[in-house]
Image: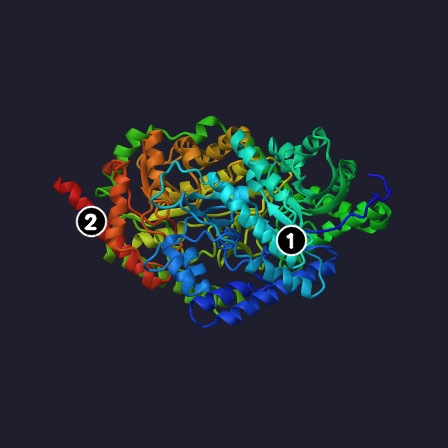
Amino acid sequence: MTSKPAAAAARATVHGYPRQGQNRELKKAVEGYWKGRVTADALRDTAAELRRTNWHRLAEAGIDEVPTGDFSYYDHVLDTSVMVGAVPARHRAAVEADALDGYFAMARGTQDVAPLEMTKWFDTNYHYLVPELGPDTVFTADSAKQVGELTQALSVGLAARPVLVGPVTYLLLAKPAPGVAADFDPLTLLDRLLPVYAQVLADLRAAGAQWAQLDEPALVQDRTPAELNAAARAYRELGGLADRPKLLVASYFDRLGDALPVLAKAPVDGLALDFTEAAAANLDALAAVGGLPGKRLVAGVVNGRNIWVNDLEKSLTTLGTLLGLADQVDVSASCSLLHVPLDACVEHDIEPQILRWLAFARQKTTEIVTLAKGLAEGTGTITAELAANRADLASRAGSPITRDPAVRARTAAVTDAAGRRSQPYGERAAAQRAHLGLPLLPTTTIGSFPQTGELRTARADLRAGRIDTAGYEERIRAEIQEVISFQEKTGLDVLVHGEPERNDMVQYFAEQLTGYLATQHGWVQSYGTRHVRPPILAGDISRPEPMTVRWTTYAQSLTGRPVKGMLTGPVTMLAWSFVRDDQPLGDTARQVALALRDEVGDLEAAGTSVIQVDEPALRETLPLRAADHAAYLGWATEAFRLTTGGVRPDTQIHTHMCYAEFGDIVQAIDDLDADVISLEAARSHMQVARELAAHGYPREAGPGVYDIHSPRVPEAGEAAALLRTGLEAIPAERLWVNPDCGLKTRGWPETRSSLENLVAAARTVRGELTAS
């Protein structure tokens, strides 16, 4: 990259920003509203203040154009459903009675009305609410949220760009509403939806919007000619509107492929493209179509999904190449910064040397501004920043933290035999049935039980020194006793210890493995008010000592029923962490798998007969392009088998997955060679059971009959009806009864009632089978 300034001054911008606030103020306000402790007006005031704080921080950092509309009380796709009037029939009365309460009813459900289905946002760990559409859906424009947030930003003197989920992506993410034929294609509603978008754009223009961003990440996936034609038609119509802001169409998470020439030819005013390593092909593809003459290009050269410092010189080289491909080149992150924590500077427990390697949302905005300055004014104006960046990169590359020769030697010595069980499934199943003696339709839970305020207080007191280790462990023992006692009284067949000692299913293990870093304030939204602190995978992985054996063995000592050992699988340990970017993911997965294999062996040696290795992220980490699936699934399933392949035939291996679309990975689920799999199924009405049956899945499965992401308590009859639906696809001798997911986020009253109803449902259906 030469030091010659660009012909047009590059601007700095972002697609979106973390919503929760430095101290998760939004979470506290929303949950306070649900509990009646915070008024609607107070909630709105908190939201407005958080937006104002975010915008001012962006502007003070040097961001030239702030995003609006990306803020949400719960989910931006749900916000889009409200914007276009796509409210399910069962929620209309609640929305009409009170818009805010109706909004949350769609997200969480009520005791009488089920919520919208929830699933993962592409290959991230963010969950969105799935739109429900049908041939009778009537769209109506409601631009109040978008206009209100734009007006708020403009009122404080900021240049602002509204951000909306694009119409094509919205329809491609939607599903047929309940009662609508399964083969209904929501994309057929495009011509009905576009006038609503036109109205929203006109309202934004009238409110002062110069630009509006329409996000179309669905176009980075494999798309049919018909879907690409729909995209062309959508942007031909929206681009041809007379009364609209300038349109910026954004894609991210991968390469655009065949959709790039479609968007390049559309009568829109600019494109925002991902130019990080995952989407490097966008650069060559953009050149192949002749660039974007007369248009704006927002270049996503800063990784919006990981936390490592940017290689500024490499990004400047990319930006320099892009200068000749568009009329205006601006600088941004690859996607919304929603997917990273807010500020690395508050992490006082991370060594200063390592902290230099990290960039959270605030640091990424600084990188973006630095790159825009270097692009616009020449690299001579950022000499100090480039020197510091080179030093940071060199510090990480040369650090002994990143390489452990013993770990690398062990990983290199792994053979194919290590990932194979000693007997085929049929023989193992017979041995397990004889050993465990479980009834037909055995009942269990996924692992965690409610994390009460007392438990969280005990952990905080231990960290603060207000109680000692002995006092803390006494509290954990008492909680395990209560959980085991409740499960025995309720009649569950395979028990869990409830995980009271665990803060998070990934963080708990990361804190006990070498090579991981933990943050204190690195919160990232997972769904709604649920936030996680993804650990940082910085170096080679090993397990210094057993992590779960002590508490699992203690729980087993309290009961004669089997207690599951609970582990988080290697793929999920990667997917829900910020992974290292200096070696292939498959290599890192093998390291984690070997550490977990040691734990599995110790659990079995301690007498644990059922061991669950959760892989909820297996589907969400699936690459967005089919051409990349085989390589990923190869190392992902290998890592799981490496974790579990050393156990005896009569040790039953379970796995768990939730809140994703499983139909396209059923073969991979089969390849895991687990004995039992539990999956989310309540909101999707047992769809996964039908998918397993269509594949001919030969092992045991527990499609969930209790939706734990909603506070409503399912009646026993409701759970029994789901079980009967499951039996239409899975034989009774291979069907388990369980919730969709862990119960950590639920309260004890609803948990007790729901599990009692679940056991009652199993007994009812078990009796029906015996009678027949």
Which part of the image, by quadrant, shows the N terminus?
A: top right
Q: Is residue 645 visible?
A: no
Side of 679 where 162 appears, left or right: right
In the foreground, 5 or 224: 224
Q: Secondary structure at mark 2?
A: helix
Above or below residue 460? Residue 623 is above
**Mark 1 to mark 2 CA distance (whole Å):** 50 Å
- Report x, y in % for residue 268: 66, 42
Which residue is labeled 1 in the image?
360
| Image position of 465 with respect to 289: above or below | below
Residue at image position (61%, 39%) is 236
For this rendering, which residue is in front, 529 or 384?
529
**Disc 2 residue type (three-letter):** Arg
- Residue furthest left as drawn: 771
Report helix, strand or loop for mark 1: loop
Residue identifier under label 2: 763
Query: Residue sitting at 49 percent across and 68 percent down?
Result: 461
Q: Nearer the viewer, residue 111 or 180?
A: 180
Seen from this angle, which residue lies furthest front? 242
Residue 121 at what x, y percent from top left?
Answer: 51, 45
Which amino acid type corresponds to the residue marked 1 in the rendered image? Answer: Phe
Callout count: 2
Which x, y percent locates residue 271?
67, 42
- Dot 1 alpha-carbon crowd within 10 angstroms: few under 14, some 14 to 19, many 20 or more: many
Mark 1 vs mark 2: which is more N-terminal? Answer: 1
Image side of residue 477 versus residue 524, left or right: left
Taking depth in this image into account, of 147 and 10 the one nearest to the observer is 147
Q: Position of residue 524 (x, y in %)?
A: 55, 54
Say if residue 282 shows up in the picture. yes
